[in-house]
Amino acid sequence: MVDAERPLLVFHGGTFDPVHCGHLAIAEAARDRLEATVHLLPSADPPHRAPTGAGATHRAAMLALAVAGRPRLQVDTRELERGVPTRTIDTLHAVRREAGADIPIAFVVGADSFRGLPGWKGWPALLDEAHWVVAGREGHPVDATLPSGLATVVRHRWTDDPDALRASRGGCVLRLDQPLHPASASMVRAQVAAGGPWRALVPAAVAAYIDHHRLYMDPGAGSGPGFGAVPP
């Protein structure tokens, strides 16, 4: 029997460069489906070179503005405090040291990120030691487009029951249909640099912050990949 009071720790990581309405749509969909607080994890700046867009301090500040007033969305800066890019397996181990070996932990990712999971450090352990909530589009089954090796590993892990995630420390993969949203971080950066229409793609407070600090206004800034120097 599922313990309804058992905490489920839910994390949604990324560069958030900048955080946009699509990020928030996924986080809120996960919050509502799982009935749990979602901790948004901004990644650290890559070492030994300038960030491709905004630095960690700006990204964390924008994320704090974006979640203000949104129930059960919180910013977790643990990866920034390490000062170097952190792989997901390292974050998982750190959370387990704090919360306990048997606490259920779930990571929220987009479908594209989940398809790339075999390239992540320690990915088989990640599947066993945490749950995965995969955000896809309604009518586009995530499990129909996975690489064959990953599809085989997760074949019997799929669930549509959020309670299954509270019943064990990890091992389940839950589909999360979420609203279609046109925003992407690279689109926002490009539109800011080009002077195009971008403000509707981010929360109003984030738009004001970008304007005030003149972020992404150099056409050459933010054109690199969204993640840091190491794969997750």
Image: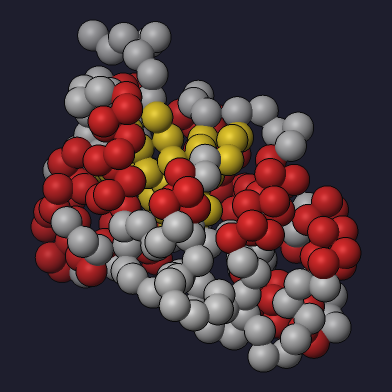
Q: Residue at x 33, y 35 (%)?
A: 95
Q: Residue furthest bottom?
A: 220
Camera sees residue 200: no
Relative depth, front residue between 218 and 154: 218
Look at the image and tell me whether residue 57 can be seen. yes
Q: Position of residue 200 (x, y in %)?
A: 82, 62
Q: Is residue 127 left or right of residue 9?
A: left
Image location of residue 136, percent across then percent down: 45, 55
Image position of 28 with respect to 224: above or below = above
Which residue occupies the foreground of this view, 94 or 36? 94
Looking at this view, is 227 or 111 the one in front? Answer: 227
Closest to the observer, 51 or 64: 51
Q: Position of residue 35 (x, y in %)?
A: 50, 24
Q: Residue at x 73, y 77 (%)?
A: 216
Question: With 191 as the anchor, is 162 left or right in this view?
Answer: left
**Can you say which quadrant of the picture contains the N terminus?**
top left
Picture quadrant where residue 47 is located: bottom left
83 lies left or right of 18: left
Q: Quadrant of residue 189?
A: bottom right
Residue 82 on image: x %, y %: 42, 52
**Relative to 202, does residue 100 appear above or below in the rendering?**
above
